[in-house]
Image: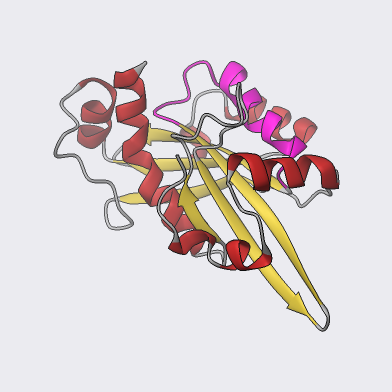
Amino acid sequence: EPQRQQREDKLYQVLRDWLASRKYQAKVTATSRKGKTWGNPDITGIRIEELPGQVTFEVATIEAKIGSDDWAYWLFEAVSHKRFAHRAYFAFAVGTDSPSVANIKDIDRLCEYAEKYRIGILAVFISSADYQTLRSGDVTNLVLSGDNTRIEVVWPAFHENVQPAALNEFVRSVLGLKSIQDLCNFANDAEVS
């Protein structure tokens, strides 16, 4: 478990940056255990919209894995985030020197599940050598960034309404945000633990 977590950690920053590039305040939230089983997304983003007299916000989450092995199991961790997130993504690394969504194993079934359960799918393409290191080598010096990865949206995450009580529980109990000010400063705080 700790070694799997250490390997997944290598994906978090590049996925956080990807979510931030979509106008979310994004941060790594993987170490929080406040949401209990399948209630702790690896990356959480909050997009705030201020309207006259009110503030609304959207929550997006990413569940990341170092490969697509057992995707039919791990995808449901991302699905479970739908109870408190407006958009949820399942992301996984793909090792290849010729990135192509068409070459991802089981891609048609993966998209069928994504469509049925209304979650987004992200493929994080990395070189074959970096992927081999990520899967089974010493990851101490492995740095993944926008320069040596390509994130492809295999299936979009569509916005869905969330029950206010579930959203409130996640924001307050898991993220520890108690006010509009906290929401606005989400990505400026230390990582959620």
Q: How many marks?
A: 0
> Residue drawn at (48%, 60%), measured in percent from left and top?
187
Image-based side of 86 in relation to 36, left or right: right
Identity of the residue furthest to the bottom in this view: 52
Query: Can residue 128 be seen in this snapshot?
Result: yes
Q: Which residues are magenta?
A: 65-85
Magenta stretch encompasses residue 31 = no
| Residue 66, image x, y percentages | 39, 28
Where does residue 35 sit, x and y in percent of width and height?
Answer: 61, 31
Residue 176 percent coordinates (x, y)? 58, 47
User: Which quadrant: the N terminus?
Assistant: top left
Q: Is residue 37 left or right of residue 160?
A: left
Q: Residue at x 58, y 29 (%)?
A: 107
In the image: residue 97, left or right of residue 176: left
Main secondary structure type of the part rendered in magenta: helix
Position of 128 with respect to 170 (left or right) is left
Which of the 4 quarters of the picture holds residue 62? top right
The C terminus lies in quadrant: top left
Q: Nearer the viewer, residue 177 or 45?
A: 177
The quarter of the picture where residue 82 lies is: top right
Q: Is residue 67 magenta?
A: yes
User: Is 165 drawn above or below residue 1 in the view shown?
Assistant: below
Q: Residue at x 23, y 20 (%)?
A: 136
Q: Position of residue 186 (x, y in %)?
A: 53, 60
Note whether residue 162 is visible: no
Which residue sits at x=47%, y=52%? 27
114 in relation to 19, above or below: above
